[in-house]
Structures are given as structure tokens and as C-alpha cells.
Image: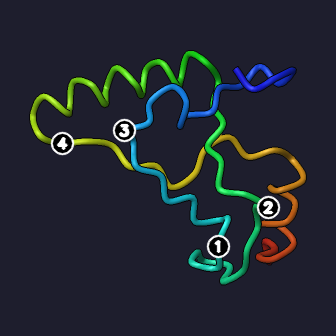
Amino acid sequence: MVKNTGFEDLQSVAPGILQDIRYATDNNFTHSKIYDCPRCLLRPEVATALSKAQAALQKQGLGLKVFDCYRPGPYQQRLWDKVPDPN
């Protein structure tokens, strides 16, 4: 558990899940970095479910890859500011 947040870092729960957190780079639809770091934070029950799914997939030679996880409000605002809704 990430201290005082109520969230789990997916890397610590399921290190075998590939992570490509695109909003921590400019390789996304905004073409700019939105997140300060490429951490994948999730509710504990979500992290546990993904860990179980990853374990089942690995038995078949497959696995998961995540591109985004929990997005705090200020980062959502950054996205809205980059690509405002014209309507």
C-alpha cells in the first residue's frame, strides 16, 4: 500500500504486468507529458484482480500491459486543458 493513500502500486503487487504509462511521456494523443512520473496506482481490489488475471495468463504464455491507471483530478484537469470539449 502506498503510504496514506489507500492505493497500491501495481509494480509492487504484480511486477510481471508490463506498464507503458503514456501520459508520463509525450507519446499520447495530447503530444505532451501529463503525469510527473510513470507509476500505476490502483485500488487494492483492482490491483489484486489484475495480479490474479496476470497469473492465469502467464500459464498460457500471455500477459497484461497497462497504459493508464488511477488519474487524480489535477491530472484530469491537465487533459481537459490540453483538449477542451468544443461543445
Which tag, 1 or 3, sits closer to the chain's start?
A: 3
Q: How crowded is mark 3: few (under 14 residues within 10 Å), some or many (20 or more)?
A: some
Quarter of the figure with residue 31: bottom right
Secondary structure at badge 3 equals loop
| Residue 34 seen by the camera | yes
State the residue lying farthest toward the bottom. 31
| Three-letter amino acid code of the residue under disc 1 | Thr
**Alpha-carbon distance for marks 3 and 2?**
23 Å
Which tag, 3 or 2, sits closer to the chain's start?
A: 3
Pointers 1 and 4 in contact (CB under 8 A)? Answer: no
Which tag, 1 or 4, sits closer to the chain's start?
A: 1
What residue is shown with label 1? 25
**Alpha-carbon distance for marks 1 and 4?**
26 Å
What residue is shown with label 4? 62
Secondary structure at badge 1 equals loop
Secondary structure at badge 4 equals loop
**Alpha-carbon distance for marks 1 and 2?**
9 Å
Which residue is painted at 46% across and 49% down in the image?
66
Secondary structure at badge 2 equals loop
What residue is shown with label 3? 16
Q: Which dot marks residue 2?
A: none
What residue is shown with label 2? 36
Q: Residue 83: where, in percent of width, then height?
A: 76, 76
Image-based side of 54 in relation to 28, left or right: left
| Residue 87 seen by the camera | no
Compared to residue 2, the image places residue 72 above or below, namely below
| Three-letter amino acid code of the residue under disc 4 | Leu
Image-based side of 17 in relation to 34, left or right: left
